[in-house]
Image (cartoon, grey):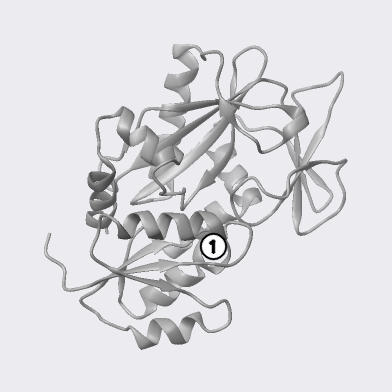
Amino acid sequence: MQRRCIYILANPHGAEANYSIESAAEIGSVLQGEIIYLSRKNWTSQIDSIYDPDALYLLSTHGGFGEDGCLHAYLEARNLRHTHSKSWSCGVMANKHHTKMLYVSLSIPTPCWTYRGTKYLPPMVVDRQEWISKPLLGGGKAGLRMEAPKSNGTRIFEEYIAGSLEISVCVVGLAGPGALPAIVRSRSRDALGVLKAATEAPSQEALEFCTSAAIRVHRALNARGVTKTDFVLDKNGRAFAIETDAHPGLGKSRATAQAALKAGISYAKLIEGICDDC
């Protein structure tokens, strides 16, 4: 696919800045494009300064305005092509409450949660219920803690599902989206957000369910490029969706690239495919 120009946009701010910088650098190693580090205060002016209706704007922007739909909406208002999903679907994925409401509408199991003092869904655990407090907005694993629910508009409180495995499924493409092989990692209550190589394998049934559910979420959002939906398995092997990432990390060591390799897709082909799906 011939392109006049590619701008690789990065968001060097916030809790996910390192992911963005890493992704941009490694994308730049396989694509001929200029990396633009967006300013938190002046990013709109930066976009205006590199305005080119024939260019492709590759979004290596994790967290904040670079992932919640604001940057996407600005580009769309100017008829500029960008990778990843449209602004409205990014807005859903960036908000954990809205994402969980989407799971409910699709009949995909998700742990019960509390937001602004209201509890959603009956609890799965009745004997020893615990709660994870999560920032309402943004992705990544930063800011997780065990905490009883409060009436808070900036955080959600999700029932903690005991189980040692987390499954991540990346889905790529707009028309007829397909899932990459699942990435399975181990988790621990004592180290929230820290994922390690799995020492056990989930059932084939659980893998198939997570793959099917991730594709359904991707389709419902009319997502494009790539999304990543994370699931936790309880002690009985049942899967629960916990979040969907509109901009999963694109560094070579991250889940998306590793899943692509498992499918026989090189890193360069993965990035080119994301570019072509715009």
- Figure disc tally: 1
Frontmost residue, 182 versus 117: 182
Is residue 85 visible to us here?
A: no
Give the quadrant of the N terminus: bottom left
Q: Is residue 215 above or below residue 248?
A: above
**Residue 51 placed where, x, y %?**
31, 84
- Does residue 256 appear to the left or right of 164 in the view shown? left
Residue 155 lies left or right of residue 258; in this view the side is right
Q: In this rendered view, identify the residue nearer to me: 48 or 186.
A: 186
> What SS does tag 1 mark?
loop
The image shows residue 145, relative to residue 155, as above or below, that is: above
Q: In the figure, is residue 49 to the left or right of 147?
A: left
- Residue 34, x across and y down, in percent: 31, 71
Residue depicted at x 64% and y 12% = 236
Residue at position x 41%, y 43% in the image: 218
Position of residue 119 measured from the top left corner of the image (x, y, whole percent): 79, 41
Looking at the image, the residue that sits furthest to the left is: 2
Asked whether 72 or 250 is in front, the reply is: 250
Badge 1 density bin: few <14, some 14–19, many ≥20, Cα 10 Å: many
Quarter of the image for residue 233 reads top right
Image position of 100 with respect to 48: above or below: above
| Residue 176, visible in the rendered structure | yes
Q: Amino acid at mark 1?
A: Asp
Q: Position of residue 274 (x, y in %)?
A: 29, 52
Q: Quadrant of the C terminus?
A: bottom left
Q: Which residue is mark 1?
A: 68
Q: Residue at x 25, y 36 (%)?
A: 265
- Residue drawn at x 60%, y 18% is 238
